[in-house]
Amino acid sequence: MTIYHELKVQAQVANRHQDVVEVDSEKEIPRIQTITLTAAGDCLMHGPLIRSGLQPDGSYCFDHFFIDVKDLINEGDYSSIDFEAALAGSETGYTGYPMFNSPDAVATTFKEAGFDLVVTANNHSLDRGYKGAIRTLDVLKGAGLDTVGTYRNEEEARSFLIKDIKGVKIGYLAYSYGTNGLPLPSEHPEFFNILDRDKILTDIETLRPRVDVLILVLHWGQEYQPKPTQEQILMAHEFLNAGADIILGNHPHVVQTMEIVKVGNKDKFVIYSMGNFISSQHGRERNSGIVLKMKLSKNMNSGETILEEVSYTPTYSHPYYDQGKLKYRVIPVEAGMERIKQGQDPFMSERDLPILEAVLQSTRGQLGEPYYRE
């Protein structure tokens, strides 16, 4: 038989079994969907930050906050930030520490920067009382943002936040250790997610079958301490073993450690504190933060979802003067250093390089190397 006839016979056989070949091929080659999530830590709206956004006509604009990290935030298909303040309106006055209340323009700034989710369960949730907290949710949602951790009614509290991102279902749960001693409204027990071990385990059990990835956001730990407590570590491991996949920590106002925890044959992740994303607190550690990036992939045939990568970009909450007015912005540390060296940053000079280098080294020292699945 000639080569020509051999090829012709093979083609005829292939055509007769075309349907079988296609089905087998579909089974053998899984369809993989990859998504990216980004997250930032605490947004603390101190008085100087509020004043930095005051405009000549009495309105507020905070777009300068995140202009230098907007691209990083938007690397995620879905991005979150922790907001420690109320949006209770001007009637009660705009104030920073210790009882935070900010202008509504903050919500617009979050949305325009690329954030999708605002975490509202923290120790400042009731800084303007229950009515102020409900208005905060209304303003954030009115700006097109999702919220988690506090709720306007029982239906919201029970429905859970589940986002379908390119066919990958992500569930978020958020809890806080407390509200700075302010009593929770007894007539609205569903309003606030208190960090209660049994409740969290119950919520994990309920939500787990409905999602591909389950993320806990926990407002916990000791302020300004570089490491988590032993209780936090044990709790994190328990929650990961119970079905959570990722734990994002807030509240200490400094960057704390992160780790990969193996549960069975699956790698899971916890970062105990992402630090301050923006604030006017004093000290390098308290103005150090990150943009966290997590890549996950789902086998659309089997339904299995795995953590592929965890990386981060160190950031610095930078106070600067613009035409005599004190302002604040978040800068990516390494890119910021490069701009300084090239003379491209109008608000920083080479004398700022040592502090940025210190932020870079301390953040890397805390978090270590990025994670890439083997």
Image (spheres, rainbow, N blue to C red):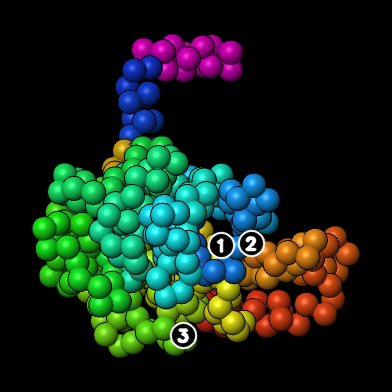
Instruction: Give the residue at x 64% y 47%.
Output: 57
Residue behind mark 3: 224
Give the spatial CA distance, label 3 vs label 1: 23 Å
* Looking at the image, residue 357 lies above or below residue 159: below
Instruction: Give the residue at x 29% y 51%.
Output: 134
The label number, if any, that marks residue 52 in the structure image: 2
Q: Name the amino acid, label 2.
A: Ser
Please identify the quarter of the rendering in which residue 332 is found: bottom right
User: Which segment is the magenta one?
Assistant: 1-17
Residue behind mark 1: 50
Q: Name the amino acid, label 3.
A: Tyr
The label number, if any, that marks residue 359 in the structure image: none
Q: Name the amino acid, label 1.
A: Ile
Q: Position of residue 287 (x, y in %)?
A: 58, 75
Instruction: Give the residue at x 78% y 65%.
Output: 324
Give the spatial CA distance, label 1 vs label 2: 5 Å
Q: In screen coordinates, is 306 left or right of 331?
A: left
Q: Position of residue 63 (x, y in %)?
A: 62, 51
